[in-house]
Amino acid sequence: VCWGPGEEELAGRVVAASGGTAIASFPASLLEFAALARRARAIVAADTGPLHLACAVGTPAVALFGPTDPARNGPWKPADVVLQRRPACFPCHRRECAKHRGILDEIPVAEVEQALLSRIGLADAG
């Protein structure tokens, strides 16, 4: 689980919720993150810099989209998976917007898990 400034506690909660299947990374520069991403089996991330950097180095992706359009911002590999919930303001490029606040929370963890298993070729394992 990679994290940025101010996200260490959130990363810890994700690790705790994983039941021992995830570990938190060390604080990483962009170059260090690119090296981690290149070696990762896959990335699950929202429409953010880490998603785009991981896709740039060839990491298989499950991309979570809400207010922005994955046709414009999304991963470009046909095998990558995009999960999206479109808010009333779609497409919206504002960082703060009452119409799309919390929209990614509408993507169930089970849907993300199934997409990840499918993306890494383990769809029958779930």
Image (spheres, rainbow, N blue to C red):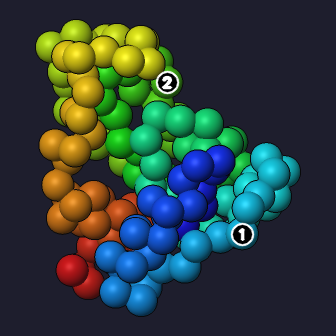
Q: Which mark is residue 73?
A: 2
Amino acid type, residue under disc 2 in the picture: Asn
Amino acid type, residue under disc 1 in the picture: Phe
What residue is shown with label 1? 26
Q: Residue at x 81, y 51 (%)?
A: 29
Identify the secondary structure beneath mark 1. loop
Q: Residues within 10 Å of mark 1 (few under 14, many from 20)?
A: few
Give the image location of residue 99, x and y in percent. 20, 16
Closest to the observer, 70 or 16: 16
Position of 7 compared to 62: left or right?
A: right
Q: Which quadrant holds the N terminus?
A: bottom right
Query: Is residue 30 depicted above or below 88 in this figure?
Result: below
Give the image location of residue 76, x and y in percent. 52, 35
Position of 77 compared to 46: left or right?
A: right
Give the image location of residue 7, x and y in percent. 54, 53
Position of 99 compared to 16: left or right?
A: left
Q: Is residue 118 at all visible to an observer of this figure?
A: no
Query: Is residue 110 depicted above or below 48 in this figure?
Result: below
Position of 43 compared to 65: left or right?
A: right
Query: Would you identify the image quadrant in which residue 109 lies?
Result: bottom left
